[in-house]
Image (cartoon, grey):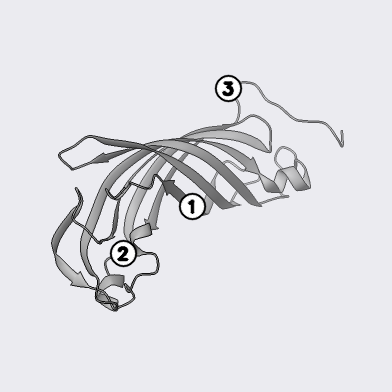
Amino acid sequence: LKHSVATNSFWSNWFLQAGADWNAFYSNEEHGSGLSRSPFKKFRAVPGFSVGVGKWFTPGIGVKLQFGISNSRGYSKEPTYYTYGGQKTADDGTPYWKSKMKWWDLSASAMFNLSRLFCGYEGKDSDKLMNQFIASVGIGALHHWGIDEQRNEWSGHLELQYSRFFSRKKNFSLDLKARATLYQTNFDGIT
């Protein structure tokens, strides 16, 4: 039927995912600063890892629960829970300290398979829509670790995913994601 909505039983269309990423932290402290010199640039990017489970309720709408762990590196104009080492001076003469925030994040997201929502469901065992685009939006609970004080906060999640499937059943894919995680303004210990 051209305009029907396909749904499935509770035990159908579950998925597992595991991922590795390379991420960079950007704070309000650094906005408009003189941190453009190369000693500051080299410190920024770090690896992260995540695992998740999800379910598609319809071919175009689903949910996922994801656990991620990483650390964020940046610079701070003042000493905080996360700063260490000596000062460095930016192009404008402002002193900065290196900072490193270790964290893990548990998030829940709504997923929208844009390819299926706009092009329709391709059917079971179809060779159509082997390339799909998925958008996700969610909220998470973030915990800082490796510091003396307990620190928890909320996080927001936005993600755009490209999936390339390798079988007609679409039970295995390689995914590329562009993800933004939004933190509270005191994520780096500065209010």
Residue 24 in sight? no
Q: Residue furthest top?
A: 10
Instruction: Check disc 3 and give the amino acid type.
Output: Trp
Q: What number is the disc on residue 11?
A: 3
Instruction: Check disc 1 and give the amino acid type.
Output: Arg
Q: Quadrant of residue 93?
A: bottom left
Mark 3 or mark 1, whichever is nearer to me:
1
- Sequence-wise, the earlier of marks 2 and 3 is 3
Query: Which x, y percent locates residue 151?
Result: 26, 37
Q: For the residue labelled by badge 1, is the local secondary structure a helix, a strand or a loop?
A: strand
| Vertical relation: 109 (above or below) 43 | above
Q: How many neighbours does mark 3 have within 10 angstroms: few (below 14), some (14-19), or many (20 or more)?
A: few
Q: Report whether 74 appears left or right of 5.
A: left
Q: Residue at x 76, y 47 (%)?
A: 118
Q: Residue at x 77, y 43 (%)?
A: 120
Residue matched to label 2: 44
Query: Which x, y percent locates residue 30?
Result: 35, 64
